[in-house]
Amino acid sequence: MNLRWLMSLSNLQLEGDGRIVPATDDELMEVESLLIDDKCQMHIVADPGQTVGCISNEGSSSGIAQLESLEGLLQSRNKEAGPDKLNARLEETVPSLAPSLSESHFNQSGSFGECSHSSDKLVAGGSTLSVVTTKPDFSKLKGEICLDNLSIKELHETFKATFGRETTVKDKQWLKRRISMGLTNSCDVSVTSFIIKDNKLVKKGNEEISNCMDGSYAEDPPIGNRKDSPTSLVSQLDYHQVVPEKIRLENPNLDDNSGSDDHQTEQRAAKRVRKPTKRYIEELSEVESKESNGRLMNLAKNPEHGLISLKSHVRLVRNVPLDGRTVVTRLDSLGGYGIQVPCVSRVRRSRPRKNFMALLKFNPSGMGMGATLVKKSLGDHSFPPDDGKESRVLKASFTPEHVHHQKLNPSGMGMEATLVKKALGDHSFPPDDGKESRVLKASSTPEHVHHKFIGVPEKDKQFSVMRAIGLGHNTELKCINSSRDSDDNVVTVPTPKGGIRRKHHRAWTLSEVTKLVEGVSRYGAGRWSEIKRLAFASYSYRTSVDLKDKWRNLLKASLAQTPQDNGMNSRKSTGAMPIPAPILLKVRELAEMQAQVYKLLITHDASLDSSGLLLPWGLCSY
DNA sequence: CTTAGGG
DNA sequence: CCCTAAG
């Protein structure tokens, strides 16, 4: 169900972009290879030492988005093609196609995101989709080849024979590495001499090519959890490049490389590596510099031996584009090339962590109060505690930097900010979005701080100047009004005691409670969305969850009260309207009835279907 | 998104 | 009320 939900979402996105609907698989392949090729060229052209970030400009981001859509499509289409079909395609061609593809994917993922031009180009020209790529002609490679002895031109030819495409790269080293990788279908570029027999590659000295499966991958440094390590990108590359697709599919979590030698299976390894998602790109700007630094440092302390390390010579490059977002990339020495790779500390496909939201607590009295989990002060809302301490909770989004630099002001007055609970370290958020949209959606541009207080009473005007404590000049702090900023005094709620509290909480009125009870009686407890829709249509601020919560509280109250109908009430009469006993009674009744009904449903399940409203408890009136 | 349940 | 898991 979840999947369907997500699917529907992504479908929408796809459909939104009409251009991206390739017709045939072959076209897809072509497009794909062009895509890849294009990207290759791009970062080849780039100066190894250069630190240009291209993610920032709008054009490119949209380009990337489209590009992503396209590739997502490509991917799914490829999947549809199925192993057999794919395999068949491969067998038409020469065995070395697999290495070729693999190599390309390698490039693709490694360099993703840095070239707006490529994506723009792709998007712009349907016409440019005519492919320059020819099929790899492995047969041209015969006998002994020693890359070290080849001229640039020869290298170019070898390159073409290997990959089926031209290259303009003049860099011998690069060419050698590429060819080497392509030929061996591995990341082992230490070998530059090859002997080709019958279209089959044999290392010099007649040593069989072993596809680096056994050695190199295993030699990956044990840096914590692979998936969480900053090298995950690279690791995944290795992984995807090495482990046959079939095995990966069957064992998503497969973390060893017990791949088979099956050649057939091997070819399927040509499956493309999953491209970083859009979210991934977005997160580039949210990478915690601290963490990255730490991890990278750590990484640097684990120098590689054995195969040429893909992770060596790593350093951080920070780009601060115009829009103020900080893009951290890693200048990765990839095969001797300075390739700028987005520096990601972990690959997380789930929902963005909320590290960077903070709870801002506004204290009406001007005294700083512990601003930590405000929620803890929230109690049973059947009888809302009139604690006066409850403060309006605002959420603000920060860039990671600011969060890191943020200090709580111990004596802070007016406002304090703290990180949301679990802000750090919880990486297991469910899929994208969530309720956060309810509150935060509207505000994504951190640039402007708009202080907008709605319904702030006179008494509080003095506090309407926000003071961000310990945040830098660049502090991008945003106040978000709660969703219900429409009608009444929203953010603040006057207290009978004369105090004023800003709170999220909206006290339940008697009529609301009544409605709820009635709703439950009609539709049954649990049909919260129904009740919400039918009975609370006009109460935009009550969500189905609210209803459920309230019902729970009512239930609790009703059960707690009835046994001994005395004493304990007084304490709760603090400030909130007590729920009239009759209503509580009804609640309990309903609860009991529904419990009974449940039994009925189990035995005579037919009794309910068409006549839900006619059931006895449905006739209750209020 | 909706429900259920814990916090 | 918030959050999360699960469907």
Image (spheres, coloured by chain):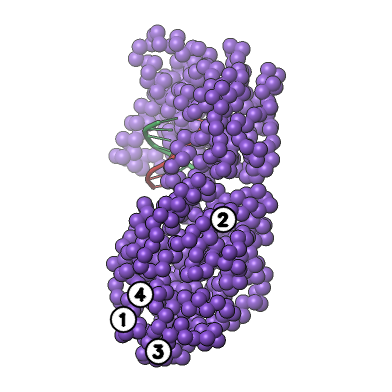
Chain colours: A purple, B green, C red
In front of the other: A455 or A129: A129
Q: CA distance from mark 3 to mark 2?
A: 41 Å
- In the displayed structure, A505 sits above or below A400; it is above
Q: Residues within 10 Å of mark 1 (few under 14, many from 20)?
A: few
SS category of the residue bearing label 3: strand
Q: Is there one chain holding both mark 2 and mark 1? A: yes
Going from the N terminus, do you reach mark 2 or mark 1 first?
Answer: 1
Eye-nearest disc, 2 or 1: 2
SS category of the residue bearing label 2: strand
Going from the N terminus, do you reach mark 3 or mark 2 first?
Answer: 3
* Residue underneath mark 3: A144
Q: Amino acid at mark 4?
A: Asn
Q: Position of residue A570 (x, y in %)?
A: 45, 9
* Residue underneath mark 2: A317
Q: Residue A211 bears which disc, if any?
A: 4
Q: CA distance from mark 4 to mark 2?
A: 33 Å
In front of the other: A442 or A159: A159
Q: Residue A208 bears which disc, if any?
A: 1
Q: Quadrant of residue A512?
A: top right
SS category of the residue bearing label 4: loop
Q: Amino acid at mark 2?
A: Val
Q: Amino acid at mark 1?
A: Glu
Chain letter of mark 3 equals: A
